[in-house]
Image (cartoon, coloured by chain):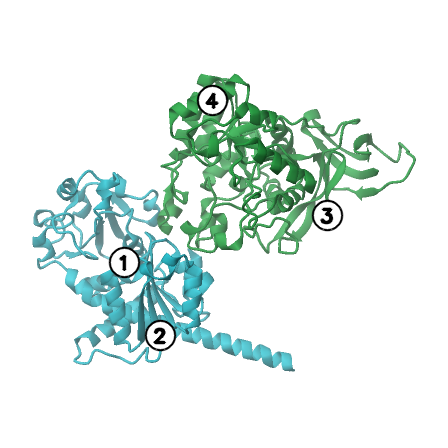
Amino acid sequence: MSDSSNLQLTEHGELRHFLTPEGLDRLMLERILDTADSFVVVGNQEIKKVPLLRGRTVVNLFFENSTRTRSTFELAAKRLSADVLTLDIKTSATSKGESLLDTLQNLRAMHSDMFVVRHSDSGAAHFIAEQVTPNVAIINAGDGRHAHPTQAMLDMLTIRRHKGRFEPLSVAIVGDISHSRVARDQIHALKTLGCKDIRLVGPNTLMPQGIENMGVTTHSNMDSGISGADVIIMLRLQTERMASAFLPSAGEYFRLYGLTTARLSQAKPDAIVMHPGPINRGIEIESAVADGPQSMILNQVGYGIALRMAVMSMAMSGQMQQRQTQASKSSSLIGEKKI
Amino acid sequence: MRIIIRGARLLDPNQALDCVADVLVRNGVIEIIGNLTDTPFDGHVDTQVNAKGMILSPSFVDLNTCLRDLNQIQKGTIASETLAAASAGFTHLCPSPDTQPCSDSGSVISLIKSKAEAAGFCDLLPVAALTKDLKGAALSNMESLSRAGCIGFSNAGFDISDNNVLLRCYEYAATFGLKVLVQAQDEKLGSGHMHAGPTATRMGLDGIPIIAETLSISRHLQLMQHTGVEGHFNQLTSAQGVALIRQAKAQGIKVTADVGIAHLCFTDSAIKGYRSQYHVQPPLREELDREALVAGIKDGTIDAICSAHQPHESAAKCAPFAATESGMAVYDMLVPLIQTLVDAGELNWMHAIVALSSNSASIAKNEITGLTVGKRANLTLIDPNHSWTLDEASQLSHGTNQALANQTLKARVKLTLKQGQISYAL
């Protein structure tokens, strides 16, 4: 969608919103990863703060629950020295009947500089960036089943730090592709970064229609799907999938698609195992694998903060630049009128 | 009162008429069709149109529209939307029964008809609710509603999942020779927000698969065949749906079908970027489906083109895509959309007039007077070369959900005559 890429960039091609990796070029994704790499070090310092967002107001708007994502965004903003306000909208204004539009316009009137948005509707962050508050930097922290770009990019950071170049890699994404907001962004990012072999593994009920058009292969058999893979990304399975007739039982799912030590041996010996968390032990993944030497699950959490610091600082900088461009344009227009 | 339309191309499918001629309408009746310079007449002329290069046809009949009155006047009123319809060449409209309150009683029917009569732009041929309150449980008073002027019965966008109720509905309608209209979409499979395909997958939106339509069509066709009721399908969307209707007609089942103009012109790819103006129900599908719908019009499988006009206020479309209301305001762009199909070589104007006028009038059981000397004039005059911009100043519908807002469009209705009176003039 070219609309998304245009919307995410300033007139000078800098990031001003981060809604999805779709439409961003390889150079931009590599810049995000390079910036994140530089922030990984900050987390290891005794004083874990940099002053990049000092005096800026970041509002975390979580229209649906997510303790983990919300806390990493909060921590990332604080490490960038921003003033942070976290709103749990579920128990706030919109439950009193205020529309999303009105809530956001009120927050904009409080001179917020950045909204980190999590919403159950696909396209919510896009809608806010395009139609509601274009001059506030929007970071998409997950919209419906569309996108979760910071999770996808922290996965790319994990892969790059542990595997290097993307071109020769075989990456298997296993599980509930249909309901996953992360899988779509992972596919976009992997393709843009040069990965050629992307395999999606799962039963037909969890495989969305026409996904092959995104340049991936689909596999209903786990063993063949992960055979020879360099990277295995396991997706979280929501327990409501059983109640809503997507799957018969957690037990059968684990037997067919759970990652066990035996199964992992089908992949390359140095394959890495990833999971966006929180993990369901014994449903998607065996404990021995989750806690084993090939697991990157805890590394991902640490990289998540660095990656979020990177996109927040880049988008804020782009947004400030855009505001200045607009201000200078309007002042030159005033000047023209005077003449 | 005399109106002269000079030099238009006259198209009337009922008489296989396609010629250039002048038309004189006197006191509401077509008096002369021919060359008026050779046929002198006496007296004053009230309106004279030089219609060289324009198309004059019998007026249009819309088999599916939402006028929003009575209780949704923030979206549109009968006065505003019937004027917009007249500006698209319509003189007769079949409003869908999902009015608020719903069209399941004689009092609602007579109220909406009287409002339209007072406005004077279009006559209403209402479609009444097939079941009380459109709940899919109890039969509406079909015979009484038919006497009140309803031309058929439909459950609008509300699927009747109980086959027992649906069978009884069709048996009862068949008893009195009443027509049923169906918007075929399985309720559960149709719970998504756009066509299930690669675009929905990329955008992370819940999809509505084609089988939601085809399963429903098959089910209704079997019940129609079983009961002998006269059936009509509103708003086909898919190539497979068209194939099922083609097959049914070949088997001799009494069935007709229409397609919304949006489905003939747009596909699901228009939604990219979460463009809520293209959020419609039933959903826009893929290019192959669009092409099959156009082919269905050409070979007569699809009898009619409807507007499926659904005006909305701006707030209805200003939200994340899934939270927006479905529907498109169509009247202001209907004729330009037909022109795009003509310009692309996909349809010609005769195809369009068959589908908008003669066939839809016959389905609505409306006597079309056509271009015949001695008959009341129900006529539409279109300038296919008129270039204009659809903006707030030019649009007539109250709906702000104009998919082609601020675009330069080609073709426009110049004049609409309803029962010999000018109901719209540009």
Q: Which mark is residue B158?
A: none
Report the quarter where the N terminus of chain B lies: top right
Q: Secondary structure at mark 3?
A: loop
Q: Residue at x 21, y 53 (%)?
A: A170
Residue B179 shows in this picture: no
Amino acid marked by disc 4? Tyr
Mark number displayed over residue A57:
2
Front disc: 3 or 2: 2
| Chain letter for mark 1 | A
Up/down of A141 relative to B265, above or below: below
Report the residue marked by disc 4: B170
- What's the CA distance linking mark 3 and mark 2? 54 Å
Is B258 in front, or is B6? B258
SS for tag 2?
Answer: strand
Chain label for disc 4:
B
> Chain ID for label 2?
A
Instruction: Tell me the mark number nearer the camera, choosing from 3 and 1.
Output: 1
